[in-house]
Image (cartoon, grey):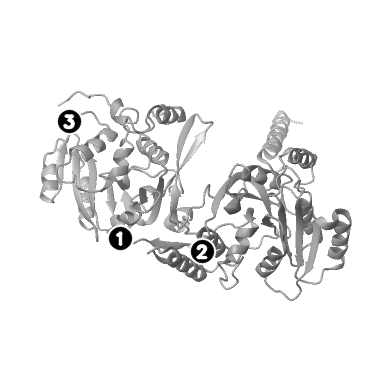
Amino acid sequence: MSGYTYSFIRSLIFYLNQFRIYLYIGGIQHHHIHEDKIKRLQKTTHGLHTLLPKNDHFSYSILMAVNQPRPHLFQESLESALNQSAIEMDVLVGLMHPPSKKIEELLVCMHQKWGEKLIIFNFFHILEKEEVINQLAEKTTRKFLLILEETHWIRPDFLFRFEQTLRIFPDREKKIIYCHLNEINDKGYFIPNSEQHQSSELLFPYFFKPMIEKGMLIPTALWKNVGGIDLHAKGAEYEQLLLKFDLAGATFQQLPLSLYSVRSSSREERKRSQASFLQVLEDYSKAKQLNWQWSPGYLADCVRAQPPLPSCYIQVVIPYKDQKELTLKCIHSLLQQKEVQFQITAIDNGSTDPSIASEIEKLGGEVISICEPFNYSRLNNLAVQMTQQAAHCEIILFLNNDVELESDAMSEMVRWVHQPQVGMVGCRLHYPDGRLQHGGVGINLQGREEIRWEHIEKLRRFKEMKVTKTLGFFDAVTAACVMMKRKTFLEVGGFDEIWYPIGYSDTHLALKVASQGLKCFYTPYAVGVHHESISRKSSIEDYENSWWLHHLLMKRDKFNNNELEKNNLNDFC
């Protein structure tokens, strides 16, 4: 064997071993649902559940509408339900067809083992699964119910973890707990990266896309109070159910664990109807006396909402230094805005070209000259403090001078800034070549040391976008174009010009707004072009992006004492 061949084989063996290790760590050889680890978890859970203080309020029914499933998959699903550790529980199985011989033998065997814990009903005349679920829910006497699909699987500690969570809350009669989902294959192996993270909280009426209804534990009295699933809302039955729960005063709580597994091979995508969804939302709006207009969204299963356009004045704050062409393009795009009233406050940070200020003033804007070293946060703060012409404006739009807005962008944003729970409103920004620059931001904590911006779907073309085509809440939005109430901005102390003079200033502002119980809202229907370079020059921002600093500052001043921390910068003019 030549030296080359021997070396090649050694390298191949090395890389194959590395790949095997990668597969194992990556989760391909993940837990089978019958592995010893699951059995140990089941045993431990049963022991721990018996130690919880006894309370008659905690009893459960698991509802299963069965429609000719594959026997071994149905067996695993049924066993996962019957093996739950709760003492006061039962599993109600509704058969939609006469069972096959194997299914019949399985049910007989299961009933002999579990006795009255397994209750079987025949609904051969019912064609809709949702109606079977309604019928089963009417028959239960337990306090809480869970809908389990005939081939899905729940972890042995599902009810134990849900009960632990429920015990925290005094208003359990109207508390709906829901968890994350993941997927398993027919052999019972978990599929890597299949986790579906449900929204951390359901906020109504901010309901623009279908909700995954699986993995929800629902108070039985609440279910019966709203009448269960309405079969007339075909294609939006579960969306309507959640809205009915909200109208009945329910609150929702996420349990951030993947305790419910969907079978990938038998996963049936629920047939959704955008028309039904819109009708359900319109009915809900009337019941809530909510004067929103609903229309189809960019995606087939999503919708667009339009609150009424308020009558208000907006201060548009634009820092600039030279860049005459870009700055004036930005100004001219503002002059094309429809249905809004605004006053431009431009902050000249030491431009060498005085004609820019003259042009802005001719166009009706005011110019404030700040001859200091560049401090993005301070420039914006001073614009709010020093304005002579826009002090009466109750809304502020912070806008980079390299952004051009489409003509209805401001009117779309101002519709949302007045809505409850909204603290900041961001828009969809594209690079000049059409790729996405901003569509909402996720904050990713790296080991709780480093805070990273994740521009959702950045650099995608419009046809490739999914998440960013839908209205919704995000952790943050970029201050390249962000709108908020003047009152909110002042209450949180504005931008932090000492600790975040340039980078991560908008991240920290979003965290301060969140501390007031408000959220960052993103609308894809307000659109602009951002001329920011895709290959920005690198900068040292490791201090600013440390979670340690964000946490320390939030703990220090609780966002109400920023004025005390401002130092008096010298006049560098």
Residue that appears at 18% across and 37% down? 386
Where residue 549 sits: x, y (%)? Answer: 42, 27
Residue 192 visible in the current orientation: no
139 left or right of 455 in image: right
1 or 2: tag closer to the N-terminus:
2
Task: Give amino acid for label 1.
Answer: Leu
Q: Which residue is mark 2?
A: 301
Residue 253 vs residue 95, the one in the foreground: 253
> Camera-side residue: 216 or 448?
216
Instruction: Tell me the amino acid under the disc marked 3.
Output: Cys
Q: Which callout, 1 or 3, points to the residue nearer the camera?
A: 1
The C terminus sits in image quarter: top left
The residue labelled by disc 1 is 309
Tell me the residue that label 3 is attached to: 371
Upstream in the sequence, badge 3 or badge 2? 2
- Residue 29 occupies quadrant: top right
Residue 425 percent coordinates (x, y):
36, 49
Q: Give the residue at x 70% y 44%.
A: 160
Instruction: Measure the alpha-carbon separation of dots 1 and 2.
Output: 25 Å
Tag 3's secondary structure?
loop
Q: Position of residue 212 (x, y in %)?
A: 58, 57
Marks 1 & 3, CB-CB < 8 Å contact: no
Query: Local crowd at mark 3 within 10 Å, few (<14), some, or many (≥20)?
Result: some
Regarding residue 116, the answer to whether it shows in the image is yes
Seen in the picture, residue 75 relative to 520 is either above or below; the reply is below
In this view of the protein, which residue sits in the foreground, 291 or 346? 291
Single out the mark in the foreground, 1 or 2.
1
